[in-house]
Image (cartoon, rainbow, N blue to C red):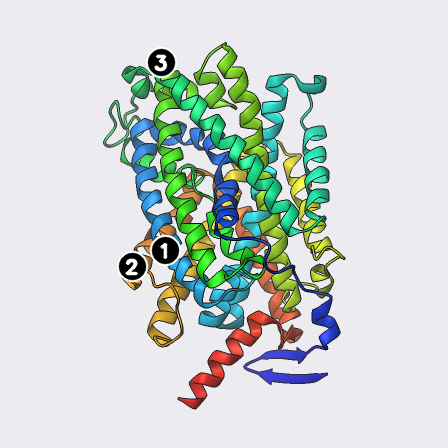
Amino acid sequence: MTEIHRGGIDETVESDDYLAKRTLRSGSAGWVLLAGLGVSYVISGDYAGWNNGLTEGGFGGLGIAAIIIAGMYLAMVLGMAELSSALPAAGGGYTFARRALGPWGGFATGTAILIEYAIAPAAIATFIGGYVESLNLFGITDGWWVYLAVYAIFIGIHLTGAGEALKAMFVITAIALVGLVIFAIAAIGHFDWSNLTNIAPTDAVGAGDWLPHGYLGIWAAIPFAIWFFLAIEGVPLAAEEAREPEKNVPRGIIIAMMMLIVTGAAVFWLATGALGANETSTAADPLVQALGDSGVAKVVNYIGLAGLVASFFSIMYAYSRQTFALSRAGYLPKGLSVTNSRKAPTLALIVPGVVGFILSLTGEGAMLLNMAVFGAALSYVLMMISHIVLRVREPSMPRPYRTPGGIVTTGFALLIAAVAVIATFLVSPTAALWTLGAFVVFMLYFALYSRHHLVANSPDEEFAALAEAEKELE
């Protein structure tokens, strides 16, 4: 083995056998499956979670926050479309930041993404438990059985391979989208304008019917507005398993974003108008509650469960690929990236799943949601910095897709993402501090151990080495 030492980072050139045991199945997805994956990541956010933001900001506060956050995500997606076309690898945001910000920035970004993806399924599992209990399925009244079942079943499906998993996700997501259409048609008949403003105004600055908690409520609602789009940035993680990733990944993530803007706006407006802002704010299953005791409500309840399962299933895919990429490059223990005969990363699926299951046992869906948002927002800051740095430092880097507006677009996303990081402390300082603590532990692991054991010939490190070589030639 060849050892390389530079800038306090130690890298080893591993054997071909090392990489052969850590390969994914290429060509498993075109842009349609990738767009479905993007929607699948997020669609549970239409069914539950976002409504807690009404408690913080009321209809007006959450509405303004959602518009701002939708703009941020659209700008970010356009930036990530460019980065994914230039650097198509399973590391996604970590790969982009590794090229732009070096090993420390790359690992920080990958860690923030991994924290988001490990915690988000735990939050979704608690929502699944709420739906199962409301349906009285199998007589279950204690959610932990549900959490265990969904983790075990869907890890098992993922172990069969990416192609099979992505197709299963696509079918479940299609069912969930049908459920949203059924809900929208039914909710129109229950809509009442007065329901939007039935939260009593407080004495906060700027408080009124539309902003019952004043201007500060807009800021406090931001983490919940993020739930409408959280995890769409995971589409580039499928790059190594996609056909023509430089074309299909940008197309898939942009189409998914457009669809999610439409579904998020419809659900927010119609559910609140049908049930009432005050009642919606505390509902475990807001879409079902909005339709009352009706046959359509029961149908939406069952399909809502499919929506939650779709996001749970797909984010599990995302955390496994982020873990796989970091492990293959030596940032995390290398055994986590070994793939099975179906080219699925076994321990990368199981280990974060065990962590998520333990977190789900708290039953604190709202707190877990805020923890996931903290990791997500931090990763957005780092990824947008990466886009700007690469545009400035490597203007001639091949980019099959270029972000409209360039660094102005991603600069806007960077600014709002930074505000979102601070907002998580405003909503739940405890959740944000716990997540920050986990992030610090990961960084200490890198500082003390893994920066001395990186793999020089992993795809992500080779991208960075190529950039350095080109810079030296210039």
Q: State the CA–CA distance, disc 3 to disc 2.
A: 40 Å
| Three-letter amino acid code of the residue under disc 3 | Gly
Q: Are marks 3 and 1 in contact (CB under 8 Å)?
A: no
- Image: 269 above or below 469: above
Q: Residues within 10 Å of mark 1 (few under 14, many from 20)?
A: many
Element under disc 2: loop
Please name whichever residue, 334 or 339, is drawn nearer the observer in this view of the structure. Answer: 339
| Three-letter amino acid code of the residue under disc 1 | Leu
Left or right: where does residue 162 sit relative to residue 75? right
Of mark 3 and mark 2, the one earlier in the sequence is 3
The residue under the point 52% across, 60% down is 92
| Residue linked to disc 2 | 404
Task: Estimate the x, y position of residue 148 in percent, counting from the top left.
Answer: 72, 35
- Residue 155, by quadrant, is top right
Q: Residue furthest bottom?
A: 473
Left or right: where does residue 204 sit relative to residue 8? left
Element under disc 1: helix
| Three-letter amino acid code of the residue under disc 2 | Pro
Residue 231 in view: no
Q: Are marks 1 and 2 in contact (CB under 8 Å)?
A: yes
Q: State the CA–CA distance, disc 1 to disc 2.
A: 7 Å
Q: State the CA–CA distance, disc 3 to disc 1.
A: 37 Å
The residue under the point 71% across, 59% down is 336
Of mark 3 and mark 1, the one earlier in the sequence is 1
Please give the label number shown on residue 78: 1
Task: Estimate the x, y position of residue 38 in percent, counting from the top left.
Answer: 48, 46
| Residue linked to disc 3 | 189
Element under disc 3: loop
Which quarter shows the N terminus?
Answer: bottom right
Q: Residues within 10 Å of mark 3 (few under 14, many from 20)?
A: few
